[in-house]
Image (cartoon, rainbow, N blue to C red):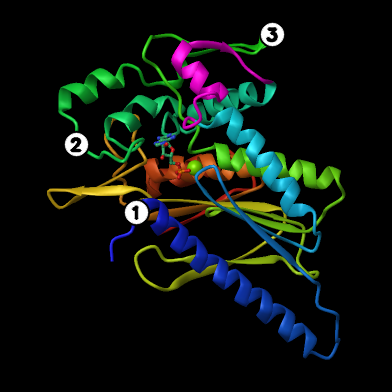
Amino acid sequence: MAFTPKIRKYLVILLILGWVYSLSYLTLHSRKSGNHRQEATLLYRDNRLLMGTLWEVVSPHKEAGKIVFAEATRIEQLLSKYQPDSEISRLNRAGRLKVSPDTFYIIKKSKELWQISQGAFDITVAPLVDLWGFTNQKYNVPVEGLIKTTLKLVGSDKIILQEKDNVVEFKFPGMKIDLGAIAKGFALDCAVKLLKERNINSCLINAGGQIYTLGEKSAHPWKVAMQNPRRPEISGILELKNKSASTSGDYEQFFFNNGKRYCHIINPATGYPADSGITSVTVIADTGTDADALSTAIFVLGRTKADELLKKIPGTKAIIL
Ligand code: AMP
Ligand code: MG
């Protein structure tokens, strides 16, 4: 059966969520039948399609889902390249824009991550993402000359930031940015901040494979199952508390040409889809922003350079397939 990339992604997510639920049940069940009988905590589950993926919120606090979805909607309206009125779309059209503090912060943070990843994480790959057809699903292998010309528009050093008035400007006409590799992680962090302000201290958020685990579930870390993208099996179970886990993989969006697989993560050094030998990488970090950006960067850099990058951000680790 042929599925579109979006549906394929939902199926993987649903499978993962299925496991999260069965693990929730197992945890609760074993505790109830142990010597120290405890009451199982009632968990509320809520889901919503946002930022092009399925968001799932699990929490003993009924209002958690509403808070998370409202915040993710706000961030999507600022950062989505698919919404014509978002700040990113307006900046991409105009080449210069005074933006909100949140948008300014995440572009500045993206530049820092570009620096520490030695250019592997680069939000200015947008024209290349378009060229390869990943924006509108009209996949094609561009001619070499076109890739070379487009590469001239790539490089986060070509984003000029005016800190005093939140103005972002591109050095060359035709430049564009794409926050697809960091926006969901940032939205997780913003949502968690709000949850904490409302004294909610236990919540699992799964934004299409980008996860944040706030506090604990029934006095135990949250358990998250990792699905093997190539085989119908679970490749590991993570136990997380106040951590984010983000996965980047070649199975999310890809096409084949002459038997070669081309995926949606671009190596900014070559202009071609990343080809580091990694099928999937999950990064665990203290923030969603770092986990999201680092998983994309490591997918580009490959296994041998991953450690060097992880050492630069304390509290991070990666599981590479
Ligand atoms: P993720 O699934 O978080 O790894 O993000 C992948 C998305 O980020 C792609 O669909 C592109 O929109 C964008 N992207 C592709 N390559 C890069 C890169 N090298 N650095 C930053 N963003 C990228
Ligand atoms: Mg990412």
Kind of residue indicated by mark 1: Thr
Q: Which mark is residue 141?
A: 2
Task: Say few, some or many: other residues with alpha carbon within 10 Å of mark 1 (under 14 / 14 to 19 / 20 or more).
Answer: few
Q: Secondary structure at mark 3?
A: helix
Residue at the image point whose x is 80% and y is 69% from the top: 219
Tally the numbered discs. Answer: 3
Percent of width and height locating residue 140: 21, 37
Q: Nearer the viewer, mark 1 or mark 3?
A: 1
Label 2, label 1: how far apart the Cα atoms are: 19 Å
Residue 146 left/right relative to 292: left
Residue 219 left/right relative to 53: right
Q: Which residue is mark 1?
A: 4
Q: Would you say residue 193 is visible in this rendering?
A: yes
Residue at the image point whose x is 75% and y is 69% from the top: 220
Residue 219 colored magenta? no
**On-image quarter of the N terminus:** bottom left
- Comes first in the chain, label 3 or label 2: 2
Kind of residue indicated by mark 3: Lys
Kind of residue indicated by mark 2: Val
Task: Say few, some or many: other residues with alpha carbon within 10 Å of mark 3 (under 14 / 14 to 19 / 20 or more).
Answer: few
Q: Which residue is mark 3?
A: 164
**On-image quarter of the C terminus:** bottom left
Q: Secondary structure at mark 2?
A: loop
Q: Which residues are magenta?
A: 81-100
Percent of width and height locating residue 303: 39, 50
Image height check: is 145 above or below 32?
A: above
Q: Secondary structure at mark 1?
A: loop
Residue at the image point whose x is 28% and y is 21% from the top: 150
Residue at the image point whose x is 35% and y is 48% from the top: 253
- Comes first in the chain, label 1 or label 3: 1
